[in-house]
Image: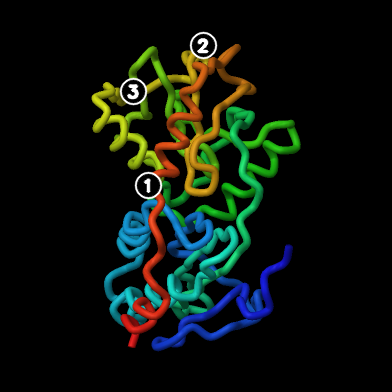
Amino acid sequence: MSAPSTVPTASVWTGSELMPREDCDVAPATIIAADSWLVENGSTRGLDLHRDRFLRAVPRETGERLDVERFWDAAIAAIPREGSWFPRVELRDQLGAPQLLARMREAPTRHRSLILTTHTGSDPRTAPEVKGPDLAAMTRLRTEAQTRGADEAVIVTPEGWVVEGTTTCLVWWAGETLCIPDRSLARIHSVTERTVVTLATALGIEIAELRVRPEELDGCEVWALNALHGIRIATAWQGGPLSTAEEPGRLSRWSLRLDALRRPLPDTVEATEATE
């Protein structure tokens, strides 16, 4: 189903309002910062965390000049309250000028599982802790993985330590312990990972930060996390562990826990008034 004609697929921030624009560029643009999240029938999870991550990625002077907080409020107000959407906000540089853009995208089909493949080439990331600058490079990497029958490529360090997927963060279970990659490894600060870790802590589950190589996860239950799919379980890993596991019921329990954290978007009228 295509987006309703009343919902622009792309809108540019004028400094006071969002204006629809053609979703094509007459000149090359470089993404400086970006963020996206899933909205289903007007509700979403971790919106404040996405907001904070995006605002932190925007250089202070640029944010003040363009009034990025006001832009954010306008972008939230523009999201339809019915249907499944995967909006994205961007700070871009085009012809030497900063530009704020809101994209209204219908949510792709979500899945409960995926196949991973270990990326064996050089690390293409240029700003590994900022979401946005490496989107194009990571998309190319994922597309290459798909030609090999996988869904997602996994970045590893030169020493072989697992870092993250091209569009996901990775966590795994060692018995009843939830494990995450060592936070000193440069990677995107995942909102979904933070949420899962917070839930686990509240439930009294032990959390471990580890440096592991893909082959050392043999027999573990491996999850790929992101805002779109929530939790997906790895059913195979090319160039990684010989086998992965799945404890019956654990994935569904945790998916329900994440779903329970969805909250309605700010009311359209209130959000619009906040921009005035």
Mark 2, residue position: 219
Q: Quadrant location of the C terminus? A: bottom left
Whichever of labels 1 and 2 marks the residue nearer the N terminus, that label is: 2
Q: CA distance from mark 1 to mark 2?
A: 30 Å
Drawn side of residue 54 relative to residue 5, left or right = left
Disc 2, SS:
loop
Mark 1, residue position: 261
Residue lying at 61% horizontally and 23% vertically, measured from the top left? 235
Q: Quadrant location of the N terminus? A: bottom right
Asked whether 9 or 124 is in front, the reply is: 9
Q: CA distance from mark 3 to mark 1?
A: 27 Å
Asked whether 159 or 4 is in front, the reply is: 4
Which is more foreground, mark 3 or mark 1?
A: 1
Amino acid at dot 1: Leu
Residue lying at 28% horizontally and 25% vertically, measured from the top left? 207
Q: CA distance from mark 3 to mark 2?
A: 16 Å
Which is more foreground, mark 3 or mark 2?
A: 2
Image coordinates of residue 39 in percent, x first then y, are 50, 58
Drawn side of residue 16 relative to residue 217, left or right = left
Image coordinates of residue 191 in percent, x first then y, are 38, 47
Amino acid at dot 2: Gly
